[in-house]
Image (cartoon, rainbow, N blue to C red):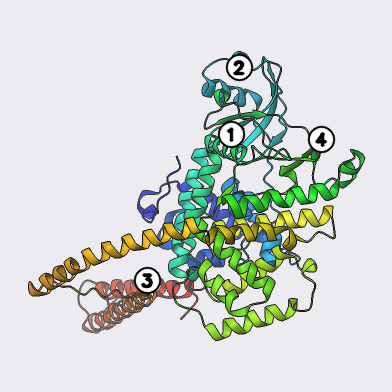
Amino acid sequence: MLSIRTIGVIGRTYRHLNRYRQILSIFFKFGFGDLIERLRLDQYLEVGLKMISKRGRPRDPRLTRAQRIRMAVEELGPAYIKLGQILSTRPDLVPGDFIEELSKLQDRIPPCSFEDIRGIIEEELRGPLENNFLEVDESPLASASIGQVHRGRLHSGEDVAVKVRRPGIGKLIEVDLEIMLHLATLMERHIAELAPHHPVTIVEEFASTLEKELDFSLEAANIRRFAKDFEDNPAVHIPNVYRELSTPRVLTMEFVEGIKISRLDLLEAAGMDRCTLTVRGADLILRQVFLSGFFHADPHPGNLFVLPGNVICMLDFGMVGIVDRSTREHFVDLIDAVVNRDEPAMVEALLQLTDWESPPDMRRMQREVTDFISRYLYRPLKEVEIGSCLKELIMLAARHSLRIPPDLFLMIKAFATVEGIARQLDPEFDMIAQAAPFLIEVNKERFSPQRLAREALGMSRMLVKLARQFPRDILDIARVIRKQQLKLTVTHQGLQDMLSTHDRISNRISFSIIIAALLIGSALIVISKAPPLIYGISLIGIIGFLAAAIMGIWLLIAILRKGKL
């Protein structure tokens, strides 16, 4: 299990100092020294920063800041690459040019030696490799930052895909996550424009996602759940998992040979029906999103294969999303509002789907929604890309400081990805029309007599409980007031930066007063010719002048380092 914690005491303990120094060196190398200064890392890593070359390499004027960020992330390693890939799906947090660059991040690195892989398999399955597999290819089918996949064969003759976690990757990622959390804490504290995005929360959510990807037993459970959800659908194939050959670090599943759904030429050559595949692929994600609330969060073309008979097979279940019934229903309300061009309903649905610290400017938000609808008003519905439309709406919400839950973003991303694949297969495909039966099904379930009865019963129970508890709460409050134990706590928000600035000002003034006192005192000693004397000048006075000069230079350097006099 991963464990991340804020390491604000790193300046005293030097925990993971080598890795921290390596990360900061990469930031300096790609020209992000200004960010290091703004984070005030010198307060925590003074010794570590002295050991880092801050020059960096000469900047290539042809490289944009976004390109340099992408190159730095690639050099930082697996955890940062994964974070960059996730941020590339968050237009509410990252500007468009950065999203374009981060989306280019590739999670492909050189494979581990087969001896290391063999060792992990034998350790996890508690026996020689030959006891469990007839053979395992030494050359991997795929190699990524977390694990690599090898083709194998069981003694029963079945072909399997064996996914093995890289040796030592868990500890490496845990160290990087601790450092990442510390940097996020400093960003939230010292960079005002980033604070509203809650960098610490983002890192914590990312750590949770990464932890799930590292545990292959969770991926095996995801596969079994998808298999259960689609067991009555012959148009969908979910690979079989071999439980007895699977552990948290090794996942053995059925080897599937098929055609990538994006290879239109191969689909045509194999005689596949593209229209049928379009409908089945769309139904695949629509059923997950609207009916079960448990969905494949990364349905890109590399994870969707076509098998004989126009059967669609999903692969790579490490990243999944879960949305509760309430979120699904509000999402349906949002789509209904977009389709019907209902501005008030659209604003209400966005507010229901998001979180906020303070209510947005409703008039301004209404105007932006009106402008959004006007761009789609005269276009036929089948020409409206609902995925892109939803992404634009979410960006609109982000501009009003409405925070979108991560799983909702994953859901919209999956929706948009599948819609894009469907339009490649069939340019005339209408996603809204295909989604209509599912929207109707959600609304039917919402207003079904059984559910209304359950909700009415639940509301009655709450009212009865309130009627019983409320008098007791009033008596408790009265008792506390009578005993003069009622306390009012007032918490100041946003004063940390001001207090920090005030401390620096006070320190500099105190330092200046001490320097001035040394100068005046030393001058008086020199004038009075207090012994001992050197060439007729008081030695004590000379020492005082030197101390004042050193302290003055020290103060000047400190001021110049901060860039302000």
- SS at mark 1 in the image: loop
- Viewer-nearest of labels 4 and 1? 4
**Residues at badges 3 and 1 in contact (C-beta under 8 Å)?**
no
* Residue on which disc 1 sits: 166
In this view, the residue in front, 513 or 249, is 249
The quarter holding residue 102 reads: bottom right
At label 1, which amino acid type do we have?
Answer: Arg
Q: CA distance from mark 3 to mark 4?
A: 82 Å
User: Does the image show residue 88?
Assistant: no
Q: Residue at x 45, y 46 (%)?
A: 16
Q: CA distance from mark 2 to mark 3?
A: 73 Å
**Labels 4 and 2: the sequence-earlier one:** 2
* Residue on which disc 4 sits: 308
**Labels 3 and 4: the sequence-earlier one:** 4
User: In x, y percent, where is residue 380?
Assistant: 80, 72
* Residue on which disc 3 sits: 550
**Relative to residue 329, is residue 499 drawn left or right?**
left
At label 3, which amino acid type do we have?
Answer: Ile
Judge the density around disc 3: few (<14), some (14-19), many (≥20) Cα neighbours within 10 Å.
Answer: few
- Viewer-nearest of labels 2 and 1? 2
Q: Residue at x 30, y 82 (%)?
A: 516
